[in-house]
Image: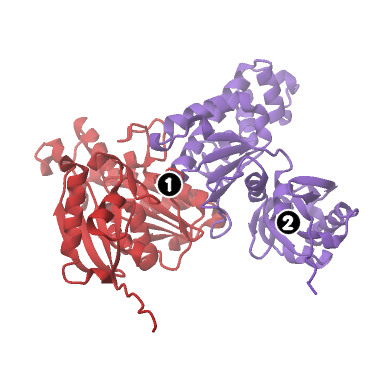
Chain colours: A red, B purple
Amino acid sequence: MLKRKIRHDYSLGIDLGGTKIAAGLCEGAKIIRKVVLPTSASTGFEGVVDVMAQACRNAMADVNEKDVSGIGVGAAGQVDSKTGVVLYAPNLKWKNAPLGEALSMALKMPVRVVNDVRAATLAEWKFGAGKGFSCFANIFLGTGIGSGFVMNGALLEGVTNSAGEIGHICLDPEGPVCGCGHKGCLEAFSSGRGIETEVKRRLARGEGSSIRDLVADDLKKVSALVIGKAAREGDSMAIKVLRESGAWLGLALANVHTMLNPQIIILGGGLMALKEFFLPEARVVLHRHVLPVADRGNELLVEAHFATEAALIGSAALFS
Amino acid sequence: MLKRKIRHDYSLGIDLGGTKIAAGLCEGAKIIRKVVLPTSASTGFEGVVDVMAQACRNAMADVNEKDVSGIGVGAAGQVDSKTGVVLYAPNLKWKNAPLGEALSMALKMPVRVVNDVRAATLAEWKFGAGKGFSCFANIFLGTGIGSGFVMNGALLEGVTNSAGEIGHICLDPEGPVCGCGHKGCLEAFSSGRGIETEVKRRLARGEGSSIRDLVADDLKKVSALVIGKAAREGDSMAIKVLRESGAWLGLALANVHTMLNPQIIILGGGLMALKEFFLPEARVVLHRHVLPVADRGNELLVEAHFATEAALIGSAALFS
């Protein structure tokens, strides 16, 4: 008698952030059922794992668990994907948290854990803008800036799982202070947080801008969203700050390109909603600094295929 | 009857530069017999290939050719290692030169061609400072600056074979002009040529230094060697320029580290003869900018095992 082949139609992906958990039952890049639950560092490691398990059970409610091959988790932080341990996740206040083991125990299913930006890179690689490429960089532009590199057909993790921390390459040793404490990191210039800080700095020293009215003189309300709104209404300071952030981004992209010579560089993340204001300048600076022999012109920069669900889909893809 | 196993005890490595060809019969990292012949771009592609073939025959004179498994070539320039074509070698004035094919025809032996810095990286990986590591950067500090990256146990070449061009990452968009025409490349600050240019600039504007006497007021004679001599004699300008070059080098190394998170960074090349003047500052800046979670302290920077023969030994290792 032939042994019946085990079928696994589905896999489960989890995007684990500092304030919410999104779990999705996936069939390839298609999300069949998605469950979002709030979470908080204050519930502790066990509390968060409980909520994750609950989200998984809800997402799998309509299918037979045997048809789910496993659970992939994309976690914001430094992750050892070999052991499933979250080494450091500042948002959740975790250090050396054995997430893979704990979640696998709770659900009696295989679990793999990766960094969320790397999970998003997997999604682009398998199903999105990186499909068919064996050498590319996937840059995530949001509140912070991260990236995943696929080189020689493999995702780079680095010896202590911090490869791709492009947000913290130094572009100007005398530049503004970054959240990491160092000076002049890319993130201090070109991330959502960096742009907000620069606008606040300019407003605080009395520079004129319609942003002041948009936030009713309350600098705490300055956000990338507000800055984008002002730029769309023609505010010259908002436009200038965004354009300068694009120039620094272009310089960083040129350096990524010079070091790694990828086929494409994918740009994604929430900040891309403001791309009209920073991307043209980024392109100019990128092509000004890129090695002529390696410049692939307009084909080099590509937009991400997935928006907010890349980490979830890529995590699920660890088991598809 | 059992088929006799073919024995290949030796392989041949060639270091192909702009002014000389060094061919060596190797047994692992050991050079059994080395032949150096002058060459020149003026003899054309065929002329250079003839000299290379001659050097190979001389190097193999004492052994049976059947015991030589193949010929590896490390060429200064942009090389497609899959086809053996030298895409661009400015020193030899070659473009799209089918070196692998031509040398293989001339000697009736298998030939592989790689970029010389990548060949040197292979030597360090197989037999030198990179032995046992699967993730490292090998930086070559000479007249120019190049590097080879081994990531996930594979040498990175990049999509157009220009991965590792660390000499041309931009550290300061307003910095000095580099040989490549761009501004503020690492090479413009920290290579032998960059250091010489900076010293000449300072001498030309009248800055005091004992270098002026060492070159008898002839600025054309300023070289890294002379600058090193002046530094050893305590010349403050020479020391200052070397120290600053080290600071820029440290910044570049920090960025390599932040992007790739290697186990070690190997430093080699002729400029290391002056390390006492630039390496301490490079270390300080490196550790100032490196991500704390990934900083491996004093274990991170390692000196190359091989000096001038790395490219030759690494080329031979393509067939060992």
Q: Residue furthest front?
A: A1
Which sits in the foreground, A221 or B11? B11
Return the x and y of residue A283 as percentages of the image width and height: 40, 54
Read off the chain for label 1: A
- Circle 1 — which element? loop
Q: Which chain is home to disc 2?
A: B
Quadrant (top left, top right, bottom left, bottom right) of the C terminus of chain B:
bottom right
Residue that carries the numbered disc 1 in the rendered image? A163
Q: Measured from the top left, where is residue B217 in percent x and y?
A: 73, 22
Residue B200 in view, yes or no: yes
Secondary structure state at the residue bearing disc 2: strand
**Residue bearing the label numbered 2:** B72
Q: How crowded is mark 1: few (under 14 residues within 10 Å), some or many (20 or more)?
A: many
Q: How far apart are marks 1 and 2 (CA)?
A: 32 Å
Q: Are marks 1 and 2 on the same chain?
A: no
Q: Quadrant of the N terminus of chain B?
A: bottom right
Q: Residue at x 67, y 25 (%)?
A: B227
Q: Which of B82 and B5 is in front in this view?
A: B5
